Amino acid sequence: MISVTPTITHIAGPALLLVTIILVASKHLRLPITVRGVLLLPAGCLIFIPINDLPIAIYIRGLLGDLSITTLILLFTASMSALLDRNFYTPRSFFLIMLPALTVGLFLYPFSLGFTDFDPYALGYSSKTFLAFFFAAALTAWYFNLYFLVIIIVLDISAYLMGIYESRNIWDYLIDPILTLFAFFWLIIWMIKRVVQYLSSRRQTHNVVEKARPPRDRWVPTDLTH
Amino acid sequence: MPIVKIASQGKPHLWLKGFLLAILLTLFICLFFVFSAIPPLEGFAPPEYEDLPSSTDKPLFQTQFITNGKARKVHCATVVEISGGRLLAFWYGGSNTRDKDTCVYSSIFNPQNAVWSPERALISREDTQQDLDRYIKALGNPVVIKDKDSKLWLFYVSISFGGWSGSAINLTTSTDEGQTWTHSRRLISSPSCNLSSLVKGNPFFFEDGTIGLPVYHEFIGKFGELLHLDREGNVIRKSRLSWGRYSLQPVIVPITQKTGVGFMRYSGKTLPRLLLVRTTDGGVTWSHPVKVDVPNPNAAVASIRLENGVILLIHNNDEDLRCDMTLSCSEDNGNTWRAIYEFEKTEGEICEENPAGFSYPYIIRTQNGDFHLLYSWNSTHIKHVQFNLGWVEQRI
């Protein structure tokens, strides 16, 4: 018997998280799109599977709390991308989401653990200075046509103004530790790929130059031939 | 996805760009008004003990145990005065601390016959689980306060995973003196999956009727904070009392509207002494913690201020063990202290056999001027000590 009946807003995060993991995995396994579509329903129902009479969603929420709106948006687009087999953002635009996510996370979380007297999390309740910085960041994203970032900010603020979570701190709508961790690993993999790409392109260039140049033992100064 | 195509091609439509700017501006203006609507801290509520009578002209001192027939281990009592001078106490208990059968218990003290009612299991972990839609492993420390409308605010800790570092604070309220309680809800006070927020010290009121809740964190760092809650129980501000890895369980003692002191348990190894912090702006900012000359064996303390400015402190007067429960007083707002009475004292083998000892004191003063002190007695009972100002003045 399931003794807890979770409400929709409370299970949205865990449900989306599980669905995304399964759909992205099925995409990487190169399962046909129709199979991925069929997987959607059982993946969504996974959160109701009871462990010790409690649905999995309750455990996930107990551990992670409410995922930020930014994470929910990224999970949604990732699952849609896997389901429809098309990319919703370019690698560049995704990089421009991951980079601020990691930067903000590295700013927020170490300080929140009490390493210093400064507490950036406290700014998210009512700090006008924080609001000014946030507005400047949003305007910068808008100015450089980073629309995906702007839309995420718009949805985050809208959710905050509607008060859909228990928290009255805007940080909880913008970012969470899961997003920061994901951004961290994604950026590391991205950097490794770039380095490998750079090294291989240099090697290719080097090979091309080497092939174009005549072998040294056969090289004869032109002035001596005449 | 047309928006992404536009973004990737770097050729934005002007109408779309303008539309997004309009939305952004509107939302930030709304955000500005929401942030502006949060009231500034106006300082601590003035103490209300100027004209307190005394229940008796003679010095009063009496002790007893609160009924405990259900839980093997009980800990961390808190108490509030309700109508008729009755006391309503809460504590948590179970087979062991952090066991799955932990509950928050309550009991009522009738001053007419000086008897505590049989305890009632008020909140179980299943109840909390149901209310929060989160897995709950165990329950922990409760603290309670009553506002001017006689509404009771009960804050209590719950653990979802791991030990105390995986805990969070929940809130439930009652408008009928504890007969019925609202569904519990979670207070969010940390961005790290809201891990590790706990309560121990007495909540208090600010000038505007909002609540100050001293809390502490013990996930990686161990430090104290002061949460500021609005009249609906939402966290609207917080200030850091300390930082680092060695300070826990703050207790705040307001002195004037703008000044106050805080005491904290010290969990470090070197020179175990009580920590003291001060504020001169009504709790917005706090001084760096300093050690005062009061031993602290990594244990919680309780404190209350008298109308003549003397601050009372209930603590373990030892560097290593919790084998005593001592009353000390300070006449200079916490700088120097003098032990004036020992509520408990065990030595030698008896002390070593009961490492839990005497701990987690909690003190309030009721409308008749009496002091009520509750503390854990060897983790098997909650002890209640009642005394009055006459008894205190005899010892000062």
Image (cartoon, coloured by chain):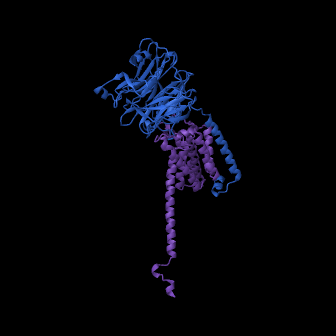
Residue placed farthest to the left in the image? B349
Q: Nearer the viewer, residue B305 or B89?
A: B305
Q: Is residue A149 above or below residue B208?
A: below
Q: Is residue B368 above or below residue B154?
A: above
In this rendering, does residue B72 appear at all?
no
Q: Position of residue B84 (x, y in %)?
A: 51, 15
Give the quarter of the image for residue B371.
top left
Q: Nearer the viewer, residue A124 or A181?
A: A124
Q: Position of residue B169 (x, y in %)?
A: 49, 33
Query: Does residue B78 appear to the left or right of B231 in the view shown?
Result: left
In this rendering, does residue A192 appear at all?
yes
Residue placed farthest to the bottom in the image? A226
Q: Which shade of the palette goes to chain A?
A: purple
> How many marks on residues?
0
Q: Which shade of the palette goes to chain B?
A: blue
Q: Position of residue B33 (x, y in %)?
A: 64, 37
Q: Is residue B141 above or below residue A158?
A: above
Q: Residue at x 31, y 27 (%)?
A: B351
Query: Does residue A164 appear to the left or right of B365 in the view shown?
Result: right
Residue placed farthest to the top in the image? B57
Q: Position of residue B128 (x, y in %)?
A: 50, 31
Q: Nearer the viewer, residue B110 or A5?
A: B110
Quarter of the picture holding the C terminus of chain B = top left
